Amino acid sequence: RYFLVGSNPAETKYRVLKIDRTEPKDLVIIDDKHVYTQQEVRELLGRLDLGNRTKIGQKGSSGLSRAVSAFGVVGFVRFLEGYYIVLITKRRKMADIGGHAIYKIEDTNMIYIPNDSVRVTHPDEARYLRIFQNVDLSSNFYFSYSYDLSHSLQYNLTVLRMPLEILKTETNQTRQESFDIFEDEGLPTQGGSGVFGICSKPYEKYVWNGKLLEAVKNTVHHDWLLYIIHGFCGQSKLLIYGRPIYVTLIARRSSKFAGTRFLKRGANCEGDVANEVETEQILYDASVMSFSAGSYSSYVQVRGSVPLYWSQDISTMMPKPPITLDQADPFAHVAALHFDQMLQRFGSPIIILNLVKEREKRKHERILSEELVAAVTYLNQFLPPEHAIIYIPWDMAKYTKSKLCNVLDRLNVVAESVVKKTGFFVNRPDSYCSILRPDEKWNELGGCVVSTGRLQTGVLRTNCVDCLDRTNTAQFMVGKCALAYQLYSLGLIDKPNLQFDTDAVRLFEELYEDHGDTLSLQYGGSQLVHRVKTYRKIAPWTQHSKDIMQTLSRYYSNAFSDADRQDSINLFLGVFKPTEGKPHLWELPTDFYLHHKNTLSLSQTRRSYTYWWTTGVLKHLPLPFDEVTCAENRRKLTVKKFHKYEEEIDIHNEFFRPYELSSFDETFCLAMTNSTRDFMPKNMGIDPSPFTVRKPDETGKSVLGNKSNREETVLQRKTAASAPPPPSEEAVSSSSEDDSGTDKEDEGAVSQRSTPVKVTDTGDNTKITENVVQSTKDVYGVNLSDVPSEDDLTIYTRFVQLGQSQHKQDKSSQQFCSKLHLDKVINLIPISSFSQDNIYEVQPPRADRKSIEIFHAHIQAGKGNMQPLGKDDFLMYREYIRNRYL
């Protein structure tokens, strides 16, 4: 047997799973649902060790041995032989949201469960294992023990705000239905010490190990189930005069209809689209951690392929294969399913920003635009006008070629109108200052205003052909606009505007470019070709050669390695299940049938062509149906009552880990990208605000060659970790949908900020070698090389003399100084009862004998020892009475 022992982070509670190894093909797992203490677990393992030895008292002969230490179970998988268990053996902290850590998987281990004695070998098992391991779990897979990554922050915090009465009824129902996985835990429920904990079901679309956990989901305690997402997660610290604001970017890639660039296009029959990624930017004040007391804000947007049946034939070996529509869909059946999913998750309005080309010599991308317009027009006939889908076509490529038009300015106008329609999420009411000094843009903001803050209703859905380069720039501009509103809502800036070339926007731009590169590597096999700097037309000319390499890399990846990666994804996600006697994965001519279920069996129910939305969705719009408190949504929640000092809900212990030995060098919050350290100019001594516009030559990261080695390695880790298997590992990027092949005007140059290649500027290098010793301007922020003026010197010398007079230094030194150059300075004599009085020492003045006697008498009177009254005292008292009353 294998015994799987799991503990909570504090290692005070333990659970044990028993895995049977005698079954050659079945998975037998026993969970005793009991919570052990550390002592009990040691005793249990000791008894097992003793009972399994060949001879009593003989150590090391057999007994119990540790096979592996791990941070979590990814799942269980079976091909043609027995089951394997996939374990996380290395992890790295990537972000922190309200004290909840988010980890990236760094390494995994697959262990074959059945014993060698019962193993039934199969010749094709090794090949399936190799294909499965092609999905590199160490590149951009993320998990969290205590935060639901598959849902947005708005959903997670809305669930937490559920009324108390509903929670009480939920816990009572749980007890009545004898769903007693918590009963063994013996929680004390005295008076008001109970706290309700809520566990929500994950959103299946963004969970990548759902199929791997299917075999054990109903047999083990839910604490064992660790759901992982695929995509991107990055966090940076924005310091506003020392106040730490964490900017986090989380991208969740859909596990439905997942795959590589040319092999997955459009949508499947269930309304899931290719390259669908939900990007959420979260902003919070890190000086207060808890979700209930802290200030949190988030904004969500989506990218995804055009929701139609379309594809591109890659057998022609062309860089841009022709686009073909595979099926006629006059009633927009697929688009209806897709937008129905979006209405449920995001509410209304759904805004489509379509960036594909509108004007072409040969009709190519325009085919998609025409079909999408027809589909949206058809679907909008049946929706109420206030909840209609908004369609914005904008030919980004045409505007990029234009010498007169600034692409980002035009995009900024679109972004403003989008954010005004959808609003954003913030968990605190509007600040009083925005009521006193209302901003006209703030008053026009959409979304839903509730007593606890604001909710985002609706979402922006951006697409081009590949949803990579153009889409990332458009999403960055919308994100930048939303970031300004988020900062304003938290009371950090006085107007909801952010300008380029500020530390805050540079930090946000770097996050977005890492995000774009990572998503581009996953889908297209290369990094971004066109970046924000390309569209600002400030990219360095050296970028041109890199563009060519990225284009070749993307073409090579699409032509040669994408098919193998697609097979791996199909096997990992359980889309294809190996079965004895049926064709193997590598024998299938196409995976079309695997992703389109209606090709194998017709569904019994047909959806209406006019009422194309799910029942109940329209009733709650503009709010998303998933966040409404109704019976259907309550079934997705598990409510449990905790004691308020329970470790499971103690965020302080979870975050600070007082039971662990930690060092500053390894502390995540010190190592993350920091606006002051990484973006603020080093020679800046005037304004440390991250919202001040800097000149291009004075920003911290304007020259990549000036980075420290540590920053460079962090950068390499970020990008290289997300690379697919070679050969597209080095010069990663693309023949992108952004017209890199045809648009001559765009060939000018692109910023390649996050490639591991170290770019240096020769001019700057010579300066660096000359000035080995740091200048005073670098150290102090002020250039002290010029001689001070005569007036300044006089003021300074007077100031020095004043200090000397005050501190009463010896007269000889004073006379010496005055002889030199201080003749006109007045010598001040301190007036003080203290003979020695300066900042270094104080000598108290001498008190006369009478004062001391009065003081002693006062002390004695305080203790109750009154002195007898003398003749003088009586006379004084009589005088007082006479003057007072007579």
Image (cartoon, rainbow, N blue to C red):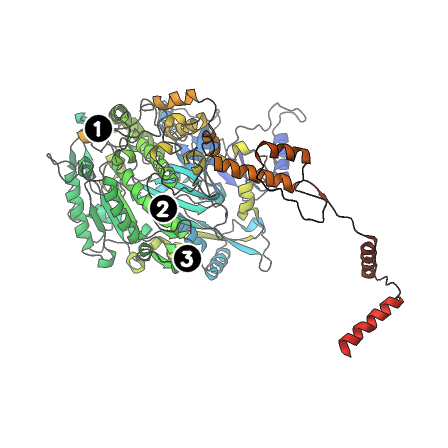
Between residue 271 and residue 871, name the one nearer to us: 871
Q: Position of residue 545 (x, y in %)?
A: 26, 23
Relative side of 32 to 882, left or right = left
Q: How crowded is mark 1: few (under 14 residues within 10 Å), some or many (20 or more)?
A: some
Name the amino acid type tagged 1. Answer: Glu
Q: Is mark 2 on a helix, strand or loop?
A: helix
Which of the two discs, 3 and 2, sits closer to the camera? 3
Q: Which residue is drawn at 29% across and 40% down?
A: 276
| Contact (Cβ within 8 Å) of mark 3 with mark 2 | no
Q: Which amino acid does label 2 sit on?
A: Leu
- Determine which of the numbered discs, if any, sits on residue 483 in the image: 2
N-terminal of the pair, mark 3 or mark 2, is: 3
Q: Residue under circle 3? A: 433
Three-letter amino acid code of the residue under disc 3: Cys
Element marked by disc 3? helix
As drawn, 765 above or below 6: above
Q: 630 or 299, which is in the foreground? A: 299
> Which residue position is annotated with label 1?
747
Nearest the camera: 608 or 776? 776
Of residues 874 and 267, the one nearer the viewer is: 874
Residue 38 relative to residue 760: left or right: right
The residue at the point 51 percent across, 32 percent down is: 70
Specify few, some or many for label 2: CA neighbours under 10 Å numbering under 14, 14-19, or 20 or more: many
Which badge, 1 or 3, comes first in the chain's sequence?
Answer: 3
Whether the residues at callouts 1 and 3 have beta carbons within 8 Å, the answer is no
